[in-house]
Amino acid sequence: MEFLTEFGLFVAKAVTLVIALIVVISVMLSAAQKEKGEDHSDGELRARKLNDKYRKLRESLQARLLSEHERKVWAKQRKKEDKARTKAEKTKHKAADTPEEAKKRVFVLDFDGDIKASDTDPLRRAITAVLSLARPDQDEVVIRLESGGGLVHSYGLAAAQLDRIRSKGIHLTACVDKVAASGGYMMACVADRIVASPFAVLGSIGVVAQLPNFHRLLKKNNVDFEVLTAGEHKRTLTVFGENTEKGRQKFLEDLEDTHVLFKEYVSERRPGLDIAAVANGDIWFGRRALEVKLIDQIQTSDEYLIEACDNADVISVAFQRKRTLPEKLGLATSAALEHTVWRVLSAFRNQKIQ
């Protein structure tokens, strides 16, 4: 037992020392980079043709199901088909006198939303790149969307980025495999068409705000907290001050106005929706959402994109921000600490105490 205690203290000291060193190095590197005036928001745009991805998956499985002799014959046949396909594409490209005659392209974007809609900036950059190439009334943009909502202004900006696509006359499809609720549905409703999996969560067209109040606790301990404002509605509810009924009523009015704006936004983009029936903050699973017209089709994003590959070039586009050295060190440290803690816990769990 004494050995385990000493071992635990040693590990704790070692971990603390490593964290301290990483923090010091990170601060120094961060300061040095700021002095150089580097732009940490820079990154790179990545594009991947999903037609090739799905084709390779199919061919990989097909090859494993064949005998060695059949695999050799099939490989030779595939090479011939690849050459023929490449030649046909070159011929078609030369014969196309106008952009309209070229093959349709489907650009695939991804948005994984947190409460602050942190993916908005990468989405904005990806959309800017796509709009520089996409052809109105011919190409399509698919947004694979996952979000349970968050801050009103953050998701309002994210939805406005998607509005840029529709305003250019480019067909926009939103695919929801898991959840697009509240702010997530605000983004989804921008699309010309919403496709969702059978049990995806959709809706939650409502607004919520909550905050604790410690005024009575402070008053009980004879602690004064003063809130000084200029403007009648500068501060309606506070965390530490005494909230009044008048302030509470104003706060509720603001919430209601935000809800009205939310409903108007959804109604404008989905005119066939009975907004009064669905804008009560409730949620619907995929099949039920189809019944109330929150979505247009039941299908997973994989199904939708694989079908699109038959008639179009499907291209995944994503902007990935370059991580700074301190961020990389932080991620590496976090992973190392997690691994160390897991090893220590495993050692304690497996140790037999006599």
Image (cartoon, rainbow, N blue to C red):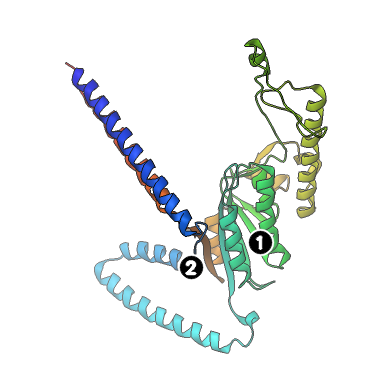
Q: In this view, does 27 lie to the left or right of 39?
A: left
Residue 63 versus residue 17: which sits nearer the camera?
A: 17
Q: In this view, does 23 lie to the left or right of 68?
A: right
Residue appearing at x 37%, y 76% in the figure: 78
Residue placed farthest to the front in the image?
A: 35
Q: What residue type is labelled 1?
A: Leu
Q: Earlier in the sequence, mark 2 or mark 1?
A: 2
Residue where numbered disc 1 is placed: 172
- Which class describes the residues within 10 Å of circle 1: few (<14), some (14-19), or many (20+)? many
- Which class describes the residues within 10 Å of circle 2: few (<14), some (14-19), or many (20+)? some
User: Residue 47's spot in the image, x, y percent?
Assistant: 49, 66
Question: What secondary structure is marked by label 2?
Answer: helix
Which quarter of the rendered picture does the N terminus lie within? top left
Tell me, yes or no, if residue 273 can be seen here: yes
Tell me, yes or no, if residue 295 can be seen here: no
Task: Give the total number of marks visible in the rendering.
Answer: 2
Q: In this view, does 309 lie above or below 21?
A: below
Q: Which amino acid does label 2 sit on?
A: Asn
Residue where numbered disc 2 is placed: 51
Q: Quadrant of residue 8?
A: top left
Residue appearing at x 66%, y 45% in the figure: 183
Q: Quadrant of residue 60?
A: bottom left
Q: Quadrant of residue 253?
A: top right
Residue 68 versus residue 124: which sits nearer the camera?
A: 124
Q: Distance between the residues labelled 2 and 1?
A: 19 Å
Residue appearing at x 27%, y 66% in the figure: 67
User: Residue 84's spot in the image, x, y percent?
Assistant: 43, 83
Q: In this view, does 301 lie above or below 88?
A: above
User: Residue 31's spot in the image, x, y percent?
Assistant: 44, 50
